[in-house]
Image (spheres, helix red, strand yellow):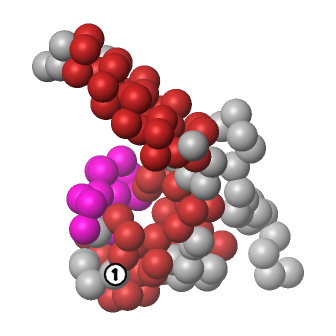
Amino acid sequence: MAGVGRTPVRTFLPIDERATFGELLKRWRRSKGLNQDDVATSASTDKGTVSEIENGRVPGHDLAPRLIAAVGAPPEQFLRALGYPIGDPVKTLDAAIAAILELDTLSDEEKQAIITLLRARVT
């Protein structure tokens, strides 16, 4: 009987679980019935790179969108599953503010000026 003993592939992540880019890429790839060669060809890279990413290597900013497209994942859904606050301007603003507040290279006045500008753009 075909498929006996195979673990079903989940194509979503519960809100409290976060996967790495590579884990999520592998889940999407498998859910679409693709192999690493298929993804590599579509993303203009090689199978070894896809394998390395699925096993923990972080892709560069130029390769990541090509890999997401290669597995047919909606970019917003993929990034949300990684924990990025996509599509919610308030959460995105909160994340940006938190990152700004942690910068050691800016004075408190500079941080507040940037935060004020960001808040004005979102509201």
* Residue bearing the label numbered 1: 43
User: Could you tell whether 44 is left or right of 5 in the image?
Assistant: left
Q: Which percent across, then down, holds residue 116?
A: 40, 29
What residue occupies the far left of the structure in this picture? 105
Residue 113 within the magenta-colored segment of the rendering: no
Q: Which percent across, then down, holds residue 69?
A: 46, 78
Residue 55 within the magenta-colored segment of the rendering: yes
Q: Which residue is drawn at 85% across and 81% down?
A: 1
Q: Which percent across, then down, holds residue 10?
A: 72, 59
State the extent of the magenta-drawn residues as a range. Answer: 50-62
Residue 5 occupies quadrant: bottom right
Number of numbered discs visible in the structure rendering: 1
Residue type of the residue flagged with mark 1: Ala
> SS of the residue at dot 1?
loop
Q: Nearer the viewer, residue 16 or 114?
A: 114
Majority secondary structure in the magenta region: loop
Residue 20 vertical position relative to residue 70 in the rendered view, above or below: above
